[in-house]
């Protein structure tokens, strides 16, 4: 796979999971450069197909700690009006709220105070790096998108719709469970990816895009969608769909 948009190898260390952003123990962070590339592809597709470049609603139904959603807000905030995140895991939802809270000046200032106290108490180099990165992020915080976080089973259309009903989602960007660090819930259907796509149809419009990152073993398809683009990078497969 060749990068079309995030072509430069930039230093993303200020966005490192566990430095300023909170992390889920045992869950590796989604690569920042790849997240930026996928999101920018979605923005370009929306401009080409729908002639739509206005800031939109970004949603991840398998958000985990909402790490890549938070990073995207710092990198491409001009394209994001609202961020919605949900997960079936209660602990993940709690952490997602904390990470998305960093997108507001008050939330980021509180995090800076928290890191400053840890530096004063322990004096670790990691805390010095975290404080420096937090101030860098503060300088990059140009806008504060509206955020919403809730707990829901991604295959349950009623749960999803109950929380997202006033305005359709423009872009879905989700990294689904692979089975190594995260798993589909036992009570989910025999084909959870298909069920998730079906559940999402209730909150999409005809101009929405759905980008799904999975491993190569999972089949991303549903009769309610058309495939717009697909590519592979390492062990990941990325599929971009549109309703219809």
Image: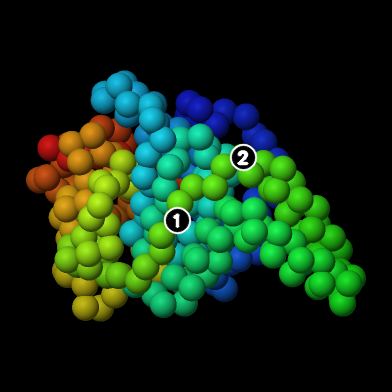
Q: Residue at x 82, y 72 (%)?
A: 117
**Residue 168 shows up from this direction:** yes
Q: Position of residue 199 (x, y in %)?
A: 18, 58
Q: Residue at x 26, y 39 (%)?
A: 208
Image side of residue 98 versus residue 56, left or right: right
Please give the residue where the numbered disc 2 appears in the rendered image: 142
**Above or below, 17 relative to 143:** below
Residue 110 appears in which quarter of the rendering?
bottom right
Residue toward you, 68 or 190: 68
Residue 6 - label: none
Residue toward you, 119 or 163: 163
Q: Quadrant of the C terminus?
A: top left
Residue 139 appears in which quarter of the rendering?
top right
Q: Position of residue 138 (x, y in %)?
A: 70, 48
Q: Residues within 10 Å of mark 2 (few under 14, many from 20)?
A: some
Q: Position of residue 72 (x, y in %)?
A: 52, 45
Residue toward you, 229 or 199: 199
Which type of secondary structure does the marked residue at label 2 adopt? loop
Q: Residue at x 39, y 55 (%)?
A: 84
Q: Residue at x 71, y 59 (%)?
A: 109
Residue 40 appears in which quarter of the rendering?
top left
**Above or below, 242 relative to 188:** above
Q: Quadrant of the N terminus?
A: top left
Name the colouring of the figure. rainbow
Please give the residue where the numbered disc 1 appears in the rendered image: 147
Total number of numbered discs in the rendering: 2
Earlier sequence position, callout 1 versus callout 2 = 2
Which type of secondary structure does the marked residue at label 1 adopt? strand
Image side of residue 43 versus residue 190, left or right: right
């Amino acid at each position: 796979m060749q990068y079309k948009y995030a072509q430069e190898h930039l230093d993303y260390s200020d966005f490192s999971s566990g430095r300023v952003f909170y992390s889920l123990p045992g869950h590796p962070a989604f690569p920042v450069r790849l997240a930026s590339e996928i999101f920018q592809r979605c923005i370009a597709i929306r401009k080409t197909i729908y002639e739509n470049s206005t800031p939109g609603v970004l949603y991840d139904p398998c958000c985990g700690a909402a790490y890549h959603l938070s990073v995207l807000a710092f990198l491409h905030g001009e394209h994001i009006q609202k961020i919605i995140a949900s997960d079936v895991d209660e602990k993940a939802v709690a952490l997602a709220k904390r990470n998305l809270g960093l997108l507001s000046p008050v939330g980021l200032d509180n995090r800076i105070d928290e890191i400053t106290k840890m530096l004063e108490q322990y004096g670790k180099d990691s805390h010095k790096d975290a404080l420096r990165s937090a101030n860098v992020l503060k300088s990059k915080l140009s806008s504060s998108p509206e955020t919403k976080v809730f707990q829901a089973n991604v295959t349950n259309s009623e749960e999803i719709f109950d929380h997202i009903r006033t305005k359709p989602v423009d872009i879905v960007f989700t990294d689904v469970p692979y089975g190594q660090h995260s798993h589909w819930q036992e009570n989910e259907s025999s084909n959870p990816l298909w069920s998730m796509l079906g559940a999402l149809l209730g909150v999409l419009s005809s101009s929405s895009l759905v980008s799904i990152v999975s491993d190569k073993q999972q089949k991303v398809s549903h009769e309610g969608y058309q495939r717009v683009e697909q590519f592979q990078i390492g062990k990941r497969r990325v599929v971009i769909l549109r309703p219809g």
